[in-house]
Image (spheres, rainbow, N blue to C red):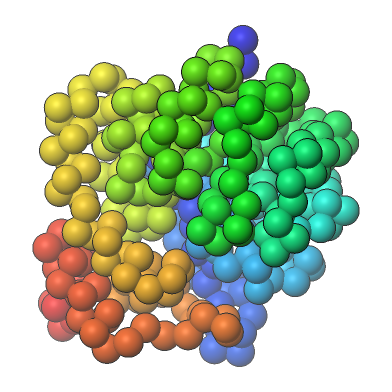
Amino acid sequence: MREPVFTGACTAIVTPFDQSGAIDYGCFGRLIDQQLDHGVDAICVCGTTGESATLSSREHIAAVAFCVKRVNHRVKVIAGAGSNDTSAALYLSQHAQDSGADALLLVTPYYNKATQQGLLRHYKVIADSVGTPIILYNVPSRTGVNIQPETYAELAQHPNIAGVKEASGNFSQIQKTRNLCPADFSIWSGNDDETAAICMLGGSGIISVVANVLPAEMHRLTALCLANDFSAAGRLQLKLKPLCDALFCEVNPIPVKTALNLMGLEAGELRLPLCPPTDASVERLKLALSSWDLLPEQTS
């Protein structure tokens, strides 16, 4: 029986850019260290929150390699490597494997709107070609494609497909997936405000945006879930809800990068077509952050 790639809270870390638009590796290293200092269980680099869609292949490969080296085996590193082009996803997957990433996060091919048969073939081609465990990523709101439970059940038979980051928000589907798939096919929440609920259905934790600003609390939330203390986990989940909502008041990662900058953690610029949030969104973020005492005095 396979062990989960990780259990607990994995931070889907932002990619900081300097004012020239290049990756700011000094800031990137400090953000990674800050996460590890506060007890997160894994780091996911070059995912949606890391603005992977705007990274060149060279930048993507370099960012993964930097993160793996910086983490230095302290926790697991999951490398985003998805694409709507199977050959491009395979290319990024092979480079992430060569860098020493512990797992690959492969979003469903977006825009193409593959059929379920197309999804099966896409993932099997990659899984047959690398030895690094694969985490599927289902986020229909972004990709226009939904992985059906029966498709999960077939993919779960592949020894190199370890589980899924499930961000469909469809709890009926998640329950059916859990029933159809073997116990060692892990399900991680892809939505912060659904963490406790998915863990209650047998989930292994969260690949989290909120952990960028509250790493210790997201680790604690998943620790409570994994200890089957869902009464305390539910209370913490409810307490986190306003911050979760604020961090998604505009498209991710606009709010979370803005929040980190407000906190003085230097997340840097956004890349077009993402742009700074409205003044109303900034005020909402300030209010949510101040409720957790996360703002420097001059910002609150």
Residue 120 image-quadrant placement: top right
Quadrant the C terminus occupies: bottom left
Figure check: 194 above or below 262: above
Task: Report the residue at 79% width, 44% height from top.
Answer: 118
For the residue pair 172 and 293, the one nearer the viewer reads as: 172
Figure check: 75 above or below 299: above
- Residue 126 image point, x, y percent: 82, 40
In this rendering, does residue 184 appear at all? Answer: no
Task: Report the residue at 15% width, 48% height from top.
Answer: 239
For the residue pair 94 and 26, the one nearer the viewer reads as: 94
Question: As drawn, which residue projects farthest toward the top?
Answer: 1
Looking at the image, how many numbered discs can be counted on the residues? Answer: 0
Residue 180 image-quadrant placement: top right
Q: Is residue 182 left or right of residue 125?
A: left
- Residue 262 image point, x, y percent: 29, 76
- Residue 153 image point, x, y percent: 64, 24
Q: Is residue 228 left or right of residue 258?
A: left
Quadrant the N terminus occupies: top right
Task: Report the residue at 54% width, 51% height from top.
Answer: 139
In this rendering, does residue 300 appear at all? Answer: yes
For the residue pair 182 and 207, the one nearer the viewer reads as: 182
- Residue 189 image point, x, y percent: 43, 40
Figure check: 64 above or below 200: below
Task: Report the residue at 55% width, 61% height from top.
Answer: 142
Figure check: 35 above or below 251: above
